[in-house]
Amino acid sequence: MTNILLILLIIIFTFTYYVIIPFQVKKRRKSLKKASFPLDWHNFLESNIYLYRILPSQLKLDLQEHIKIFLAEKQFIGKNGFTITLDVKLSIASQACILLLGDTHHKRNYFPYLKYIYVYPDIILENKNSPENPVVLLGLSSVGNKSGHDGVIYLSWTEVAKQSQYPSKGENVIIHEFAHQLDQEFGNATGMPRLGNLQESIIWGEIFAQEYYNHCQAVKNKQSTVIDAYGAVNPAEFFAVVTEGFFLKPRLLQVYHPLLYEQLSKYYNVSSIEWSKN
């Protein structure tokens, strides 16, 4: 009898986790998408978010749907006295969801392991020797699907506000940290997010390995690079900075690193070169 009860509990849990909960999530998201997008939200984004401003009209509508879902599912927490406002939420959500625009099959699924977004008023440096107090420079990203803890992104509002307005040097801490979320979906950042199949993974791996090596050599030799030098730290950082480049200076990336641009365009399923003059 005990074994039968245990089996029934396992069946109920499995059915709930894999059928009922996904159905409820899908239903809730469908309802959120249908809700109107406030005009003042749109006006704020047009005035303050460069990446929103340059999007084609249809992609703006798609992004608005993603923003509504993102705001409903993620929790923003102000740190060190910082106050979370609607403007803060919109600034972060709009740019994070840029990475979801081409996700027609919902493979990226709204960064499923991310629960909390900690926003600091400025760049801070905490105790390097304490794992409980991570170093926060411009931002930091972690996922907890292996440890059992919720994923967290740490952001500096000073950097977010500054980089949101203009493409600057091709840097965007939100794009960078949320690219890490995609890369870390299975727990470890490797520079290879989840791709469609084995063949795509092999091609990606070959191209990124060669490009990463070339970039490291260029940085080592103090050569000027289109890709941020920080990408030479490791393959995970390379993926994050080339993602920044893909969205913020796609023409330069396409000219100097056409194979990289092609792979990123296939992965994100958008043609960012059509949006921007950079």
Image (spheres, rainbow, N blue to C red):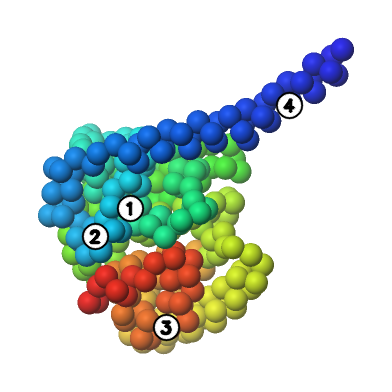
Q: 42 or 249: which is nearer to us?
A: 42
146 over 54 or under it: above or below? above
The amino acid on which the numbered mark 4 sits, given as a three-letter code, is Ile
**Amino acid tagged 2:** Ser
Residue of label 4: 11
Q: Which mark is residue 57?
A: 2
Which is nearer the eye, 35 or 102? 35
Q: In this image, 262 relative to 18: left or right? A: left
Q: Quadrant of the C terminus?
A: bottom left
Where is residue 179 drawn, in percent x and y? Answer: 43, 58
Image quarter (top left, top right, bottom left or bottom right) of the N terminus: top right
Who's the residue at 42% across and 60% down the image?
102
In front of the other: label 4 or label 3? 4
200 lies left or right of 154: right
Q: Nearer the viewer, mark 4 or mark 2?
A: 2
Residue 205 is at least partly visible in this image: no
Q: Residue at x 58, y 37 (%)?
A: 148
Q: Residue shown at 19%/40% (left/top)? A: 38
Are the residues tagged 4 and 3 within 8 Å (C-beta)? no
Gap in angstroms between the C-alphas marked 1 and 4: 37 Å
- CB atoms at circles 1 and 4 under 8 Å apart? no
Q: Which mark is residue 62?
A: 1
What type is the residue that disc 3 sits on? Answer: His
Confirm or deny contact between disc 4 and disc 2 (CB under 8 A). no
Instruction: Give how far apart the Cα atoms at labels 3 and 1 are.
Output: 28 Å
- In the image, residue 233 sits, relative to residue 16, either above or below, namely below
Q: Image check: 203 left or right of 14?
A: left
User: x and y percent of residue 175 in the render?
Assistant: 35, 58
Tell me which corner region of the image, top left, top right, bottom left or bottom right, holds residue 249: bottom left
Q: Which residue is mark 3?
A: 257
Determine whether the residue tagged by mark 4 lies in a helix, strand or loop: helix
